[in-house]
């Protein structure tokens, strides 16, 4: 999804952001000269514009790096930005993901994680897949504030109504949007909440939201825009479906369902998830 931002234009930073960066640099004793800022756009983000900003420190061999996230316009159709910020703050305090360093009107400054973002191919690596499963178990064990009601069905209906409002009559027919109400109701009936374990889920387990430190093998799950309470099986299903995607091609919207993980891959992931607590033998 393309997003429009009120962020960096031709390398010019918003004044409020520059003041925040100066404040952080002063706090860290860096003595920042704004002329020495280096701004690097990071590709791959779908709902925000993300930049790595760096500047020299007193130790000239080790520059300071932070990540700046500029909020995209129009994405409030898909999630509540205020709730996302509260989730990020809470997860940051719990030691999950990057630390929140500061906020400004149209975005925030985060800790820069020295790790690489996964590729589509990484999801098929058995070692990396097991590490993701263990991290996901840790994520699901978090006790998060706010409503613990399952959000899946209300969210699907909300998105469907948004789509109907945006699509032309031709597209409504082409994508069979008129039939999706019945499909959602059928799934909700066939998958009753009381038969599933409910936990705080990420709800967007695509490869671009997972990072790994290749030296320590530490996995970090990032970007919590869609986070909320759901059946934990939703994160499994979403992650398996994301294995059919590659967002770094000329056709990022096309899923390749012939690459959906086979039974052995899915079972391996679930075993790694269950065994990660050290309490279960599988």
Image (cartoon, rainbow, N blue to C red):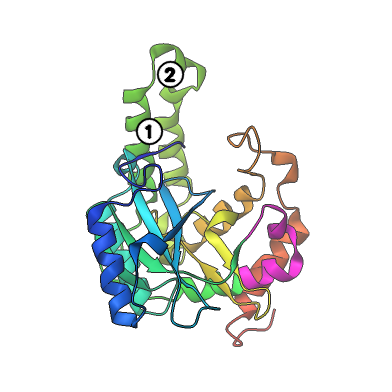
The residue at the point 57 percent across, 65 percent down is 211
The residue at the point 39 percent across, 15 percent down is 168
**Measured Cα–Cα span from mark 2 to mark 1:** 11 Å
Q: In the displayed structure, would residue 125 be above or below residue 139?
A: above
Give SS at disc 1.
helix
Q: Residues within 10 Å of mark 2 (few under 14, many from 20)?
A: some
Q: Quadrant of residue 169?
A: top left
Give SS at disc 2.
helix
Quick one: which residue is furthest to the top in this view? 170
Q: Quadrant of the C terminus?
A: bottom right
Q: Residues within 10 Å of mark 1 (few under 14, many from 20)?
A: some
**Residue 203 on image: x %, y %:** 46, 55
Query: Magenta span has 262?
Result: no
Q: Say the numbered circle drawn on residue 196.
A: none
Query: Magenta span has 131?
Result: yes
Q: Look at the image and tell me whether residue 254 can be seen.
A: yes
The residue at the point 46 percent across, 34 percent down is 183
**Residue 153 on image: x %, y %:** 37, 46
Give the camera-side residue of 94 and 164. 94
| Secondary structure character of the magenta stretch overall | helix
Q: Name the residue tied to disc 1.
A: 160
Give the camera-side residue of 247 and 199. 247
**Residue 128 on image: x %, y %:** 69, 68
**Residue 18 on image: x %, y %:** 28, 60
Q: Magenta stretch: give its range.
A: 118-132
Q: Name the residue tied to disc 2.
A: 172
Q: Quadrant of residue 231?
A: bottom left
- The answer to whether residue 204 is left or right of residue 68 is right
């Amino acid at each position: 999804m393309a997003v429009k931002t009120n962020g960096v234009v031709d390398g010019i930073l918003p004044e409020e952001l520059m003041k925040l960066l100066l404040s952080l640099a002063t706090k860290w004793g860096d003595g920042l000269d704004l002329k020495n800022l280096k701004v690097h756009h990071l590709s791959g983000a779908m709902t925000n514009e993300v930049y790595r900003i760096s500047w020299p420190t007193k130790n000239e061999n080790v520059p300071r790096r932070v990540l700046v996230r500029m909020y995209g316009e129009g994405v409030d159709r898909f999630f509540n930005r205020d709730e996302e910020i509260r989730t990020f703050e809470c997860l940051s305090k719990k030691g999950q993901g990057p630390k929140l360093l500061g906020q400004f009107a149209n975005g925030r400054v985060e800790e820069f994680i020295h790790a690489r973002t996964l590729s589509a191919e990484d999801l098929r690596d058995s070692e990396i897949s097991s590490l993701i499963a263990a991290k996901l178990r840790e994520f699901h064990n978090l006790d998060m504030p706010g409503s613990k009601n399952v959000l899946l069905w209300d969210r699907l209906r909300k998105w469907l109504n948004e789509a109907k409002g945006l699509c032309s009559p031709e597209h409504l027919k082409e994508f069979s949007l008129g039939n999706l109400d019945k499909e959602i109701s059928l799934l909700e009936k066939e998958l009753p909440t009381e038969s599933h374990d409910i936990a705080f889920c990420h709800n967007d387990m695509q490869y671009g939201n997972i990072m790994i430190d290749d030296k320590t093998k530490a996995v970090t799950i990032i970007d919590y825009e869609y986070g909320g309470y759901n059946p934990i099986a939703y994160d499994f299903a979403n992650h398996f479906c994301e294995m059919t995607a590659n967002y770094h091609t000329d056709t990022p919207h096309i899923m390749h369902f012939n690459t959906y993980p086979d039974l052995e891959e899915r079972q391996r992931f679930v075993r790694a998830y269950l065994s990660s607590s050290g309490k279960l033998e599988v």
